[in-house]
């Protein structure tokens, strides 16, 4: 068998690096024991059978192909951590993981967290619909109107406002990566052309991901396992220097048919490996998600209203920090049962960067606080920068479907849908059907006595197409307002005739010519 290796790196377009495509070095033959210089972080290995002298051509082609990622350590001069005055950050995210889903599907990781005194923030509250607004709130502290305006011409134009850029300017080595590139990734709407951080794992997954049942694999290893191994390598490589890493995983949790329990033991093993090696002595770990499950049958019970809005958040605090900053650690323990948002975590990152507990204010949420400060038990969603639509600080009370306010809410919601559908742009010879409410699945209400507001939460299916939706309707001084409606049905394949994918959830396509 003949084997060779290639270094994989981003392509060069118009004399500039383009991380959306790859270039490969010449495939260099090697044998067991061969040593070489690591020129790029990603290495592709290919093996072929030795050609028989009786055959002109090898009909089998490659019999082995695998890709590997290694941290190629930067020689950039950075401050060596010798007195633990600077703290590193490792963010590990799993898409679509509510706190409830975590406890039911990842019991081994939950047991590990409890044993090692990780803080479980049961009131972690999302601030937007899907991944992008929640992650951008976490990384920028900005609201979506600012983000959309700044990032509209591409993520490269707004990377400076993402907090890893602030860490980089302060001398930290930065890294990020995300698996399952078939999905619209966290930043895909605007996308990166240049690497956003010092280390960027995307080239590894561009070598080719394959779906095998419930697994997404990059060559011989699951893509998430690649991320975990690389994260360990990153933390280890810079254990004596300042580092900020954020790694996001999708393939074990993003879709309804994904099974988070399949990666449960691997995650525990990864944390154990880092813990036993001592490389986490100065590192905060934030293990979190963006939101809970938003689609499917699990969204029919009213409990799913809360689960979808309350993602998981677990924080590992370095032992040295616990001893040195007793008050701040005590506040974190208190806050684990208080409402916390991505904006609060953004401010926490700033405190870690500046090695300070000074109160910093973000325009989006003047009342938000670093979790090093005690958060009030009387905090409201308005205080925390959470829109009424996503707020979970109330108990949903069932209400009769025939109640006059519910009847009016349903009618207004149907009118809202019709207005949305009228504005959808479709491909030629197709239109979107006019949807009518087929079945009301659940109706609930809650009150905000301070602001004299009444809210109605209605879930229903429509015809044709059996598409499900959830709506929140505000009643204030007799006036009704329908908040933007979201689908609770698994991805609507009947809406593939739309030009803008964001409107697919509201369209059931009908041929018109």
Image (cartoon, rainbow, N blue to C red):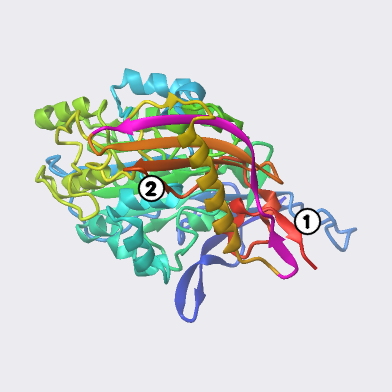
The front one of 37 and 133 is 133
Q: Circle 1 is placed at which residue position?
A: 61
Residue 436 lies in magenta, yes or no?
yes
Query: In 3D space, how far apart are the residues under numbered discs 1 and 2 (Cα atoms)?
Result: 46 Å
Majority SS type along the magenta span:
strand
What residue sits 45% from the left and 62% below the top?
A: 39
Tag 1 and tag 2, C-beta contact below 8 Å: no
Q: Position of residue 340 (x, y in %)?
A: 27, 36
Left or right of 335? Residue 231 is right
| Residue 370: quarter of image | top left
Mark 1, secondary structure of its residue: loop
The quadrant of the rendering that contains the C terminus is bottom right
User: Image point 20% across, 53% down: which residue?
Assistant: 362
Q: In the image, residue 122 lies at what x, y percent?
A: 33, 27
Residue, x 18% and y 49% (percent of image)? 366
**Residue placed furthest toward the right:** 54
Badge 2 marks a residue whose secondary structure is: helix
Rendering quarter of residue 21? bottom right
Which of these two is toward me, 425 or 247?
425
Q: Which residues are magenta?
A: 428-449
Q: Residues within 10 Å of mark 2 (few under 14, many from 20)?
A: many
Q: Is residue 412 visible?
A: yes
Can you identify the residue that label 2 sits on?
Answer: 134
């Amino acid at each position: 068998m003949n084997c060779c290796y290639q270094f994989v790196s981003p392509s060069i377009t118009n004399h500039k690096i383009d991380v959306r495509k790859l270039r490969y070095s010449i495939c260099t033959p090697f044998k067991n024991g061969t040593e070489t210089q690591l020129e790029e972080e990603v290495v592709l290995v290919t093996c072929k059978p030795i050609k028989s002298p009786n055959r002109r051509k090898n009909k089998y082609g490659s019999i082995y192909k695998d890709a590997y990622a290694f941290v190629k350590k930067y020689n950039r001069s950075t401050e060596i951590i010798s007195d633990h005055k600077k703290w590193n950050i490792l963010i590990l995210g799993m898409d679509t993981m509510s706190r409830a889903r975590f406890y039911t599907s990842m019991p081994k990781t939950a047991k590990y967290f409890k044993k090692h005194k990780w803080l479980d923030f049961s009131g972690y509250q999302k601030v937007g619909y899907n991944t992008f607004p929640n992650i951008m709130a976490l990384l920028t502290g900005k609201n979506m109107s600012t983000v959309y305006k700044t990032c509209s011409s591409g993520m490269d134009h707004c990377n400076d406002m993402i907090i890893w850029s602030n860490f980089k300017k302060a001398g930290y080595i930065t890294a990020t990566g995300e698996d399952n590139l078939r999905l619209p990734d966290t930043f895909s709407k605007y996308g990166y052309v240049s690497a956003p951080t010092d280390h960027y794992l995307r080239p590894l997954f561009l070598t080719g991901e394959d779906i095998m049942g419930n697994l997404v694999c990059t060559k011989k290893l699951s893509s998430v396992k690649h991320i975990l191994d690389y994260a360990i390598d990153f933390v280890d490589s810079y254990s004596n220097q300042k580092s900020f890493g954020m790694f996001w995983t999708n393939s074990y949790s993003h879709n309804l048919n994904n099974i988070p329990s399949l990666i449960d033991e691997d995650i525990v093993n990864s944390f154990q490996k880092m813990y036993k090696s001592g490389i986490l002595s100065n590192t905060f770990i934030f293990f979190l998600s963006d939101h809970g499950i938003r689609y499917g049958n699990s969204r029919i019970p009213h409990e799913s209203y809360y689960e979808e809005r309350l993602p998981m958040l677990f924080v590992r605090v370095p032992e040295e920090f616990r001893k040195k900053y007793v008050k701040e650690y005590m506040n974190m323990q208190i806050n684990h049962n208080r409402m916390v948002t991505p904006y609060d975590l953004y401010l926490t990152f700033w405190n870690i960067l500046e090695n300070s507990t000074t109160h910093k204010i973000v325009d989006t949420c003047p009342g938000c606080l670093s979790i090093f400060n005690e958060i009030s038990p009387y905090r409201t969603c308005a205080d925390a920068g959470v829109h009424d639509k996503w707020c979970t600080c109330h108990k949903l009370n069932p209400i009769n479907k025939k109640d006059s306010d519910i009847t009016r809410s349903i009618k207004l919601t149907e009118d809202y849908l019709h207005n949305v559908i009228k504005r959808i742009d479709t491909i030629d010879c197709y239109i979107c059907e006019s949807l009518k409410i087929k079945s009301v699945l659940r109706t609930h209400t809650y009150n905000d006595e301070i602001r004299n507001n009444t809210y109605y939460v209605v879930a229903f299916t429509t015809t044709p197409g059996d598409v499900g939706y959830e709506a929140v309707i505000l009643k204030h001084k007799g006036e009704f307002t329908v908040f933007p409606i979201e689908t609770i049905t698994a991805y609507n394949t009947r809406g593939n005739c739309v030009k803008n994918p964001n409107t697919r959830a509201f369209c059931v396509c009908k041929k018109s010519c």
